[in-house]
Amino acid sequence: MQSEFEMTDLGEMTYFLGMEINQSADGIFVCQRKYANEILKKFNMENCNPVSTPLVQNQKLCREDGASKVDESMYRNLVGCLLYLTTTRLDLMYASSLLSRFMNEPREIHFRAAKRVLRYIKGSADLGIWFRKSEKFNLVGFTDSDWVGSLDDMRSTSGYVFSLNSGAFCWLSKKQENVA
């Protein structure tokens, strides 16, 4: 290609669109540590206490809970940042998609749940996807769904993840179209 087009070899990729790429003989590790820390700083959560899970277990959020409304643009900005972070953080997919359901009229309870995700990120900023080098290919898939995860319309959320060797390459978390 260099004979046909003018180009410069910049060497191995190490940083691209907020993703850090570390290449070694054992494989490739992709994370968003720097971006995660920027999000924490942006929302004044860099000194928060970390938690071990992104959401409170079995907590059900609904649109109308009687709590006061919060700034929509700030909430949307926060959820957008979390959604971009799911590029390398599959553990944030469910929480991010759940929080994105309330972007029209976010309430204080939704904002507190989003801040808990930030507290989780504080303690897990180094996580990412490890694509390990291997001679044989091992395809693994997982799927699961909650039961009536949405109190607003009684629909469940399903999700799946597929990995090849050690690195996930396909994942989804989506509200089901029909009531189970």
Image: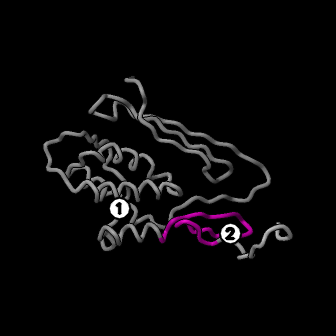
The picture quadrant where one finds residue 76 is bottom left
Write down the region rendered in magenta: 14-34
Q: Quadrant of the N terminus?
A: bottom right
Q: How many marks?
A: 2
Q: Earlier in the sequence, mark 2 or mark 1?
A: 2
Mark 2, Cα crowd under 10 Å, few <14 / some 14-19 / many 20+, is some
Amino acid at circle 2: Gln
Q: Which residue is mark 2?
A: 23
Picture quarter containing residue 139? top right
Query: What residue is shown at x 27% (from left), y 42% (from top)?
Result: 61
Q: Between 14 and 5, which is closer to the camera in this rendering?
A: 5
Q: Which mark is residue 118?
A: 1
Residue at 59%, 63% in the rendered image? 30
Residue 118 left/right relative to 142: left
Q: Is residue 20 magenta?
A: yes
Q: CA distance from mark 2 to mark 1?
A: 28 Å
Query: On the rendered image, what quadrant is the C terminus found in?
Result: top left
Q: Position of residue 56 (x, y in %)?
A: 31, 49
Residue situated in front as seen by the camera: 170 or 24: 170
Residue 129: x and y, percent?
58, 58
